[in-house]
Image (cartoon, helix red, strand yellow):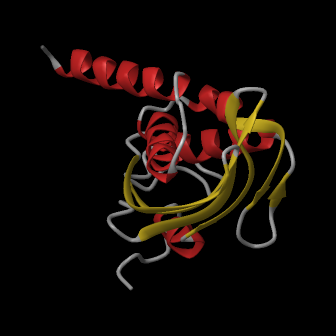
């Protein structure tokens, strides 16, 4: 089995789990969030965001940036992924609080790994690495809506200063 087959098998396994998610407890919600994060960021299945977020999601970023539609979230993730085509996530912690059978509050902490090999909002690629310095923390609401699990609200805070340094000529050694 070559690398392509291994990736295809992993993607299929993740897709099967999220498509047939039966979330009944905090551990199920935790696994669902880990799986969709891997699909979207590690495997660039950005179109799946439409499956996992409500159309009118309220999505907050740092610097008072607010997205109020799933299209804005897709565009933001697509631009980020294009700037870091070898992007990978390392999920460190997912804390889940069950509000009721149809609603979970989730806190997620992860690091992004990858190199700026693609054009970004800051300009041409620099080739610089995110190393282990790009922390992302999210607080989100996961709700069952018409039988499907969807994110309805998210506050996401990335290491914006580090991202800018990696995507510009600013030094990254501090």
Q: Which residue is drawn at 35% across and 80% down?
A: 173
Task: State left or right for residue 22 relative to residue 17.
Answer: right
Q: Quadrant of the N terminus?
A: top left
Q: Considering depth in this image, is 137 or 174 the residue closer to the camera? A: 137
Q: In which quarter of the image is residue 24?
A: top right
Question: Quick one: which residue is furthest to the left in this view?
Answer: 1
Q: In which quarter of the image is residue 172?
A: bottom left
| Total marks in image | 0
Q: Measured along the vertical axis of the image, is residue 114 above or below residue 82?
A: below
Q: Measured along the vertical axis of the image, is residue 34 above or below residue 111?
A: above
Q: In which quarter of the image is the C terminus?
A: bottom left
Task: State left or right for residue 75 relative to residue 41.
Answer: right
Q: In the image, residue 33 lies at what x, y percent? A: 51, 46
Residue 119, visible in the rendered structure: no
Q: Which residue is drawn at 41% across and 39% down?
A: 42
Q: Measured along the vertical axis of the image, is residue 73 above or below residue 107?
A: above
Q: In the image, residue 98 lies at what x, y percent? A: 61, 57
Q: Residue at x 39, y 62 (%)?
A: 130
Q: Which residue is drawn at 72% across and 63% down?
A: 61
Task: State left or right for residue 121 relative to residue 20.
Answer: right
Residue 58, visible in the rendered structure: yes
Q: In the image, residue 170 lies at what x, y percent? A: 49, 75
Q: Quadrant of residue 105?
A: bottom right
């Amino acid at each position: 089995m070559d690398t392509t087959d291994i990736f295809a098998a992993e993607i299929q396994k993740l897709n099967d789990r999220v498509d047939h998610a039966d979330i009944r407890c905090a551990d199920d919600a935790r696994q669902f969030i880990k799986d969709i994060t891997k699909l979207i960021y590690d495997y660039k299945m950005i179109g799946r965001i439409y499956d996992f977020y409500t159309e009118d999601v309220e999505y907050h970023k740092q610097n008072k940036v607010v997205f109020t539609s799933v299209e804005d979230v897709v565009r933001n993730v697509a631009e980020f992924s294009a700037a870091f085509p070898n992007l990978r996530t390392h999920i460190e912690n997912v804390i889940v609080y069950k509000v009721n059978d149809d609603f979970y509050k989730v806190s997620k902490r992860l690091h992004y790994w990858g190199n700026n090999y693609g054009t970004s909002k800051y300009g041409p690629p620099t080739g610089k690495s995110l190393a282990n310095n790009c922390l992302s923390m999210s607080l989100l609401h996961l709700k069952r809506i018409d039988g499907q699990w969807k994110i309805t609200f998210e506050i996401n805070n990335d290491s914006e200063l580090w991202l800018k340094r990696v995507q510009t000529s600013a030094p990254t050694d501090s």
